[in-house]
Image (spheres, rainbow, N blue to C red):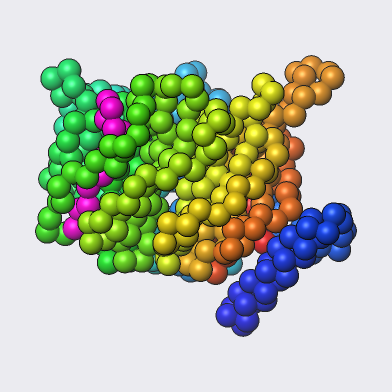
Amino acid sequence: MALRAARHRRSWKRRFLAGASAAAAAGLAVTATMAINAEAAWTSSWNVSASGWSAADSPQVSVDRQGDALLAWTAGDMSTTYSYQRVQTRVQYASGTKGAIRTLSPDGAAVSWPETASDDTGDSAVVWQQDSQVVGRRVAASGSLVGPLQKLSTSAPATTPVVAVTPGGTAMAAWAEIRDGSWYAVARRIKLDGTVGAPITLGSGSAEKPAIGVDRNGQFVVAWARASDVVARRITSTSVSATKVLTTPIASYGGFGMVRVGVDRDGDAVISYHSGGGAVAQVWASRWSRTGTLAAPLRISAAADNAGFHHALATDLDGDSMIVWTRYANGKLELLGRRLSAGGTRGAVTTLGLGDRPDLALDDDGDGMLVFHTVVAKSTPPYSYTKTSARLVSRSGTFGATKTLTSDGRVPQVDTAPSARFTVVWQQESFPYPIKSVTGP
């Protein structure tokens, strides 16, 4: 029954995307029947965070191969004097059952920016910034905590952690920290039992957030920005590769940043990033094969476009990627997207309308979802509201119609099960700012 339902969802999705694409090409409106079918496949949104707690932005979600999702966020108890933020998690099972809320961080600590990743069976790792250090903790598939809180960084301040988990459960965290006045990129394993490995100094870095991905064989790719370039290294269970410079042909007077990594099943990596300075900021992508071959950087945004701050990258198991980015146009931010094939062919650019803070997820075969938020002006105070929306993406790179998930939400994040069942999480924009989630289609 589960397999039949998954096939039905995928068949419906392809018919919907194909119909939307054909209608658009013919200059026709997408029919109301399509919209009804799309909405019927979504669950109702629900409050992830506890009543009486006020959450911060940038909640996170990771989904295992059964479709169970771990949601992570920061929130403070408004009934307490100082309402200290705590890192909290909660499991949403594919069946729809919700687990208990777990608090991972101690009371009184200054915490921010949790990141999470899960293995095939739902055992997860959560990392975050705490009191100028980077810390982490394991969470079992049941939602229970495994082992003690672990300090991962070796110096302070340490910031902007990211994490990936192998199919079998070994996690790797990466972050930036200052040693003797200089920034370094550092990585460290967090094992299934909650113990940690030795720190791995990757090399000189910057305060920019690194990026990390992992293939189906358990090989990690970590990429990060330095003062004048973007570099990457591979980490296996027994070795760390030499540093690979990705950006040698690109002039960037303002430096590089916003690094993202996508990895296919065998370890071929796509690394996307911003270049600053010059006339306009631009988005690029480098392809680094598992054999070590580095292709020339590909310009993703148009040469004349001034790219915005945020962009998103997702890669399927065959190595095909989708990239969505923002650009400034007439004083507003709009979204654009294009496909990048495993062979390095850039698809046509699709203009997606106004939006910001994009996030992407692709399933095993490349069917995906884009989520984003849009600030909409209105004539009465507070003179704007923020809505969170989603668009399906076909494996050929076609974007479906926009579906509004909420008219009161910001900073959405999305992840997927292997067969295109997506879990989305966001922060409600209005007080008391709960974290909310929905699953579909």
* Left or right, residue 168 beside residue 114: left
Vertical position of residue 366 compared to residue 81: above or below: below
Residue 250 picture location, percent across and down: 35, 34
Q: Is residue 224 visible?
A: no
As rendered, which of 367 and 291 lies closer to the eye?
Answer: 291
Name the quarter where the N terminus is drawn: bottom right
Tell me which residue sits at (67%, 43%) in the image.
351
Tell me which residue sits at (38%, 62%) in the image.
264
Tell me which residue sits at (42%, 22%) in the image.
277
Query: Was residue 229 drawn as part of the magenta stretch in this picture?
Result: yes
Query: Was residue 320 drawn as part of the magenta stretch in this picture?
Result: no
Q: Quadrant of residue 353?
A: top right
Residue 91 picture location, percent across and down: 49, 55
Name the quarter where the C terminus is drawn: bottom right
Residue 355 picture location, percent across and down: 65, 36
**Most common SS among magenta residues:** strand
* Left or right, residue 392 beside residue 134: right
Tell me which residue sits at (83%, 18%) in the image.
380
* Left or right, residue 266 beside residue 8: left
* Left or right, residue 387 beside residue 26: left
As rendered, which of 38 and 105 lies closer to the eye?
Answer: 38
Report the magenta residues as a range: 224-236
Q: Is residue 3 visible?
A: yes
Vertical position of residue 252 compared to residue 114: above or below: above
